[in-house]
Image (cartoon, rainbow, N blue to C red):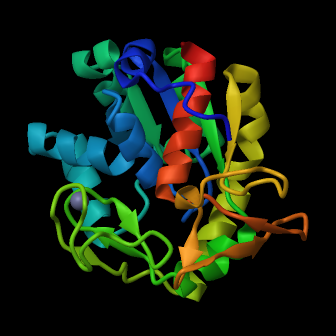
């Protein structure tokens, strides 16, 4: 990894101001944490959940809100005809237009992608490339937990400074009820069927950059950027069947900021 091409944070913030970025990756690939890193640069974090809650709060009596609320209460995926207009309206708000935004977990389907690209020029799509083995076993092995307030994710690979407490906001950390192997596999399958197939379409519509979590063998790196488990550097089998080291939260932030600096500075 190159050493700090972005070393001036204010310069980087200025360079990404107003940029419109979408974030892709399978469940468990760290979209929440990367969103937080981008938010720290001044971009507005938008996800389906954030836009839905804002719409319901804004105008609880509208048909759209009532409909959306009923899906949310059931914990069901909100259908395109409800979520698409809500997201579009959210993105057209001045704070998103001026500061730029990071769209996390949307578009999820080809229809959503077409709706988005027909209305908004996206500057960059980031794909979080995480080995399948880690997505399936790492989440369980690492005892993943999430902040109830800001949704930052932690695990035994990326420990919080104080157990049970979010480093960023002091919120309580909880294990997600759906973090067990069957639901993870189900979510991955849904991703493979619905989302992954339209990545080539995204590539046609905007600049698509891959952000891998693994390191090449020969890559020389400070150990503070590596995922460790119980004090040992953790090795994962990649989708190509080779063993590789992985970046931790800090390492991924570094890699992300480097990429943004190369792209926009
Ligand atoms: Zn938090």
Q: Position of residue 21 (x, y in %)?
A: 50, 28
Q: Toward which corner of the image does residue 245 lie, by quadrant?
A: bottom right
Asked whether 246 or 185 is in front, the reply is 246
Query: At 42% across and 53% down in the image, what residue appears?
Result: 32
Q: Is residue 90 left or right of residue 56?
A: right
Q: How many marks?
A: 0
Q: Is residue 202 above or below residue 181?
A: above
Q: Is residue 239 left or right of residue 53?
A: right
Q: Is residue 247 above or below residue 82?
A: below
Indicate which quadrant contains ligand 1.
bottom left
Asked whether 93 or 126 is in front, the reply is 126
Q: Position of residue 162 (x, y in %)?
A: 24, 75
Query: At 72% across and 59% down in the image, what residue appears?
Result: 193
Asked whether 261 or 240 is in front, the reply is 261
Q: Is residue 150 above or below residue 62?
A: below
Residue 104 seen in the current view = yes
Q: Toward which corner of the image does residue 111 lie, by quadrant?
A: top right
Quarter of the image with the C terminus in it:
top right
Q: Position of residue 26 (x, y in %)?
A: 62, 58
Q: Position of residue 140 (x, y in %)?
A: 54, 85
Asked whether 239 or 78 is in front, the reply is 239
Residue 59 seen in the current view = no
Quarter of the image with the N terminus in it:
top right
Q: Toward which corner of the image does residue 113 lie, by quadrant?
A: top right
Query: At 45% across and 13% down in the image, what residue appears?
Result: 15
Q: Is residue 167 left or right of residue 37?
A: left
Query: At 78% across and 66% down in the image, what residue appears?
Result: 244
């Amino acid at each position: 990894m190159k050493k700090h091409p972005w070393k001036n944070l204010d310069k980087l913030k200025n360079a990404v101001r107003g940029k419109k970025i979408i974030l892709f990756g399978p469940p468990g690939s760290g979209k929440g944490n990367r969103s937080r890193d981008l938010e720290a640069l001044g971009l507005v974090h938008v996800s389906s959940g954030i836009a839905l809650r804002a719409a319901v709060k804004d105008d609880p009596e509208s048909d759209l809100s009532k409909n959306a609320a009923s899906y949310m209460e059931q914990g069901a995926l909100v259908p395109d005809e409800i979520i698409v207009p809500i997201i579009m309206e959210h993105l057209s708000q001045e704070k998103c237009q001026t500061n730029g935004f990071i769209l996390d977990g949307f578009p999820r389907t080809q229809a959503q992608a077409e709706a988005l690209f027909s209305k908004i020029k996206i500057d960059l799509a980031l794909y979080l490339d995480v080995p399948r083995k880690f997505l399936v076993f790492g989440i369980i092995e690492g005892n993943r937990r999430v902040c109830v307030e800001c949704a930052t994710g932690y695990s035994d690979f990326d420990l919080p400074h104080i157990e049970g407490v979010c480093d960023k906001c002091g919120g309580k950390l909880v294990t997600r009820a759906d973090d067990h192997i069957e639901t993870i596999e189900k979510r991955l399958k849904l991703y493979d069927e619905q989302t992954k197939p339209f990545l080539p379409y995204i590539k046609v519509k905007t600049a698509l950059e891959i952000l891998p979590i693994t390191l090449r063998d020969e890559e020389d790196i400070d150990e503070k950027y590596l995922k460790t488990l119980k004090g040992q550097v953790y090795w994962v089998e990649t989708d190509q069947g080779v063993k590789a080291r992985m970046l931790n939260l800090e390492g991924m932030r570094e890699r992300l900021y480097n990429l943004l600096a190369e792209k926009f500075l």
